[in-house]
């Protein structure tokens, strides 16, 4: 977490904001290519993951997130990406990448659910508006909690601009927008309460990479269990136990290095499980792009055939690759942990945590 309360009304996009920006632009380009038109066709948007009224009944839960990366026109994506950069910079600069992404994606999912339940008839939705409105809701929550020094004029301007756009934009989905907005406020309030209670529950502040990695593992395992309510409850309990174990490990000598090793092993095991569970069902259904050069298409077909004929060997390769990649990605933290003799939660750092209250 960032400790400073003062942020600028505009900040250059940080890592997570820039990543979301790049993915949205890339997906828009792909939908344009598949449509062959000046704007993505409704059919292409539906294939890529647009949210519609029957998605939940068909257990197409992936659409709860995928729809937020699709846009119906150039004007649509330009407005959304401008707001993402404008509001995302101050929020990510204040709360860090992990909490920022958590707020964003919870707002995206909440917006999709709100859209479904506020449309009794046919419903078709695309766009990042729910996630972006969640960012604005989180900023407003921080302002109300007196955790941030953004001027009131910032909120008057941004909320007024949104109302103006909504009044003149055809097909604006108020349900999705407001669902994301209030979800962003709620998540930010919960995170602030957690940060207030954190010094009593945890020995040390989790580094950003630990929070991000544990979050990704939680989402992937939830997807493997098809988001079953009972499985989600069990997974939540396991996640809490793992988080507390990581907290204890971080406070021990060389604990940061042990945490890196455990996360690398967890990443590898989950990646292996994904391959083992999905390869038999998807290997024969993989369709290669028609514009691939012949040598690349031939190499990919041979790779898919080899993986299908020997799933155990393919899984082993994935496990080793993911484990090694995790160690490389977290190499600075690993080397720092190996040199640490007093534990990640040093005395001075514990004093800093006692001084802080909330986000």
Image (cartoon, rainbow, N blue to C red):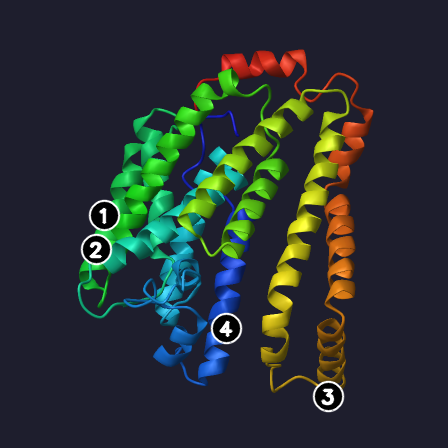
Any part of residue 46 in sight: yes
CA gap between label 3 and label 1 equals 53 Å
* Classed neighbour count for the residue bearing mark 4: other residues with Cα under 10 Å, few (<14), some (14–19), many (≥20): some
Residue 147's quadrant in the figure? top left
- Foreground mark, 3 or 1? 3
Measuring 74% from the left and 59% from the top, which residue is drawn there? 318
Upstream in the sequence, badge 3 or badge 2?
2
Image quarter (top left, top right, bottom left or bottom right) of the C terminus: top left
Cβ atoms under marks 2 and 1 closer than 8 Å: yes
Upstream in the sequence, badge 4 or badge 2?
4
Q: Position of residue 47 (x, y in %)?
A: 43, 75
* Classed neighbour count for the residue bearing mark 3: other residues with Cα under 10 Å, few (<14), some (14–19), many (≥20): few
- Foreground mark, 3 or 2? 3
Disc number at residue 29? 4
Measuring 63% from the left and 29% from the top, which residue is drawn there? 246
Q: Secondary structure at mark 2?
A: helix
- In the foreground, 122 or 166: 122
Upstream in the sequence, badge 4 or badge 1?
4
* Classed neighbour count for the residue bearing mark 1: other residues with Cα under 10 Å, few (<14), some (14–19), many (≥20): few
- Whether 180 is drawn above or below 40: the answer is above
Q: Position of residue 231 (x, y in %)?
A: 47, 47
- Foreground mark, 4 or 1? 4
Determine which residue is flagged by label 3: 294
Measuring 44% from the left and 41% from the top, which residue is drawn there? 233
CA gap between label 4 and label 2 equals 28 Å
Determine which residue is flagged by label 1: 160
């Amino acid at each position: 977490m960032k400790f400073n309360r003062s942020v600028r009304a505009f900040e250059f996009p940080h890592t997570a904001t820039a990543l979301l920006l790049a993915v949205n632009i890339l997906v828009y380009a792909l939908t344009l290519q598949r449509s062959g038109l000046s704007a993505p066709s409704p059919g292409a948007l539906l294939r890529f993951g647009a949210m519609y009224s029957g998605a939940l009944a068909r257990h197409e839960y992936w659409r709860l997130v995928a729809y937020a990366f699709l846009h119906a026109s150039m004007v649509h994506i330009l407005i959304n990406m401008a707001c993402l950069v404008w509001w995302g910079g101050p929020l990510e600069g204040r709360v860090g990448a992990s909490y920022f992404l958590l707020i964003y994606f919870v707002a995206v999912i909440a917006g999709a659910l709100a859209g479904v339940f506020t449309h009794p008839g046919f419903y078709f939705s695309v766009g990042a508006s729910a996630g972006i409105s969640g960012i604005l809701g989180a900023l407003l929550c921080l302002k109300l909690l007196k955790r941030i020094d953004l001027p009131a004029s910032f909120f008057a301007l941004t909320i007024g601009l949104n109302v103006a756009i909504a009044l003149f934009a055809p097909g604006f989905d108020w349900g999705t927008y407001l669902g994301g907005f209030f979800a962003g406020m709620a998540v930010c309030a919960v995170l602030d309460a957690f940060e207030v209670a954190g010094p009593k529950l945890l020995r040390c502040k989790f580094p950003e990479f630990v929070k991000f990695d544990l979050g990704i593992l939680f989402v992937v395992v939830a997807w493997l269990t098809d988001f079953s309510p009972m499985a989600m409850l069990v997974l939540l309990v396991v996640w809490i136990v793992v988080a507390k174990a990581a907290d204890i490990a971080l406070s021990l000598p060389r604990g940061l290095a042990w945490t890196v090793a455990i996360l690398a092993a967890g990443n590898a095991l989950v990646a292996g499980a994904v391959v083992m569970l999905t390869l038999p069902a998807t290997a024969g259904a993989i369709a290669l792009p028609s514009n691939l050069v012949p040598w690349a298409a031939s190499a990919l077909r041979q790779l898919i055939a080899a993986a299908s004929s020997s799933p155990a060997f393919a899984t082993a390769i994935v496990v080793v690759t993911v484990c090694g990649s995790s160690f490389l990605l977290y190499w600075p933290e690993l080397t720092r942990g190996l040199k640490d003799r007093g534990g990640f939660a040093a005395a001075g750092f514990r004093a800093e945590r006692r001084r802080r209250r909330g986000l």
